[in-house]
């Protein structure tokens, strides 16, 4: 299992809209994320727009490759560009994320 930590930046004037959208994520997007092998996915938003994400998967590169071919994921990423100040990364399935390196784990 891989643990993935990531950072995003939400535009300060879009935070409330962003939170409302994430309260009702598209069911077909959730299905695509699960089909890609992503689980235990959470986002943590600071009031300055900095967001930390955590997820687990068996193979991050395979999950990204799967999502790069997903029409619903493409639509979601395009939609999110109105809310994010994070550039997309084609090598990460087109997601607007900065991957973090784990520095500590207590199990």
Image (tube, rainbow, N blue to C red):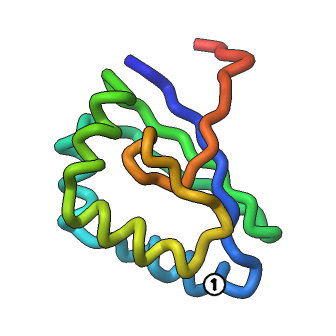
Q: State the image quarter where residue 65 is shown.
A: top left
Q: Residue at x 42, y 77 (%)?
A: 79
Relative vertical location of residue 30 with respect to residue 97 in this rendering, above or below: below
Instruction: Estimate the x, y position of residue 29 in percent, counting from the top left.
Output: 26, 62
> Which one is nearer the viewer's eye here, 34 or 61?
61
Judge from the rendering whether residue 18 lies leftward or rightward of residue 40; answer left or right: right
> Which one is nearer the viewer's eye here, 69 or 63?
69
Q: State the image quarter where residue 60 is shown.
A: top left
In the rendered view of the protein, which quadrant contains the N terminus? top left
Mark 1 neighbour class, 10 Å CA radius: few under 14, some 14 to 19, many 20 or more:
few
Instruction: Estimate the x, y position of residue 54 in percent, counting from the top left.
Output: 54, 40
Relative vertical location of residue 45 with respect to residue 107 in this rendering, above or below: below
In the rendered view of the protein, which quadrant contains the C terminus? top right
Q: Secondary structure at mark 1?
A: helix
Q: Residue at x 21, y 55 (%)?
A: 70
Q: State the image quarter where residue 25 is shown.
A: bottom left
Q: How many numbered marks, from 0 up?
A: 1
Q: Residue at x 41, y 31 (%)?
A: 56
The residue that disc 1 covers is: 16
Q: Residue at x 23, y 41 (%)?
A: 66
Tell which residue pokes out farthest to the right in this image. 48
Instruction: Estimate the x, y position of residue 102 in percent, counting from the top left.
Output: 66, 22
Instruction: Estimate the x, y position of residue 24 in percent, counting from the top left.
Output: 37, 76
> Which one is nearer the viewer's eye here, 15 or 78?
78
Relative vertical location of residue 64 with respect to residue 102 in this rendering, above or below: below
Relative vertical location of residue 20 with respect to residue 6 in this rendering, above or below: below
């Amino acid at each position: 299992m891989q643990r993935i930590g990531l950072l995003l930046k939400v535009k300060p004037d879009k935070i409330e809209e962003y939170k409302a959208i994430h309260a009702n994520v598209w069911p077909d997007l959730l299905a695509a994320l699960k089909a890609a092998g992503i689980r235990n996915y959470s986002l943590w938003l600071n009031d300055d727009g900095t967001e930390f994400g955590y997820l687990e998967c068996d193979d991050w590169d395979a999950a990204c490759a799967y999502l790069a071919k997903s029409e619903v994921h493409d639509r979601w990423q395009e939609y999110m560009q109105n809310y994010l100040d994070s550039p997309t990364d084609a090598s990460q399935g087109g997601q607007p994320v900065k991957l973090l390196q784990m520095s500590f784990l207590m199990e």
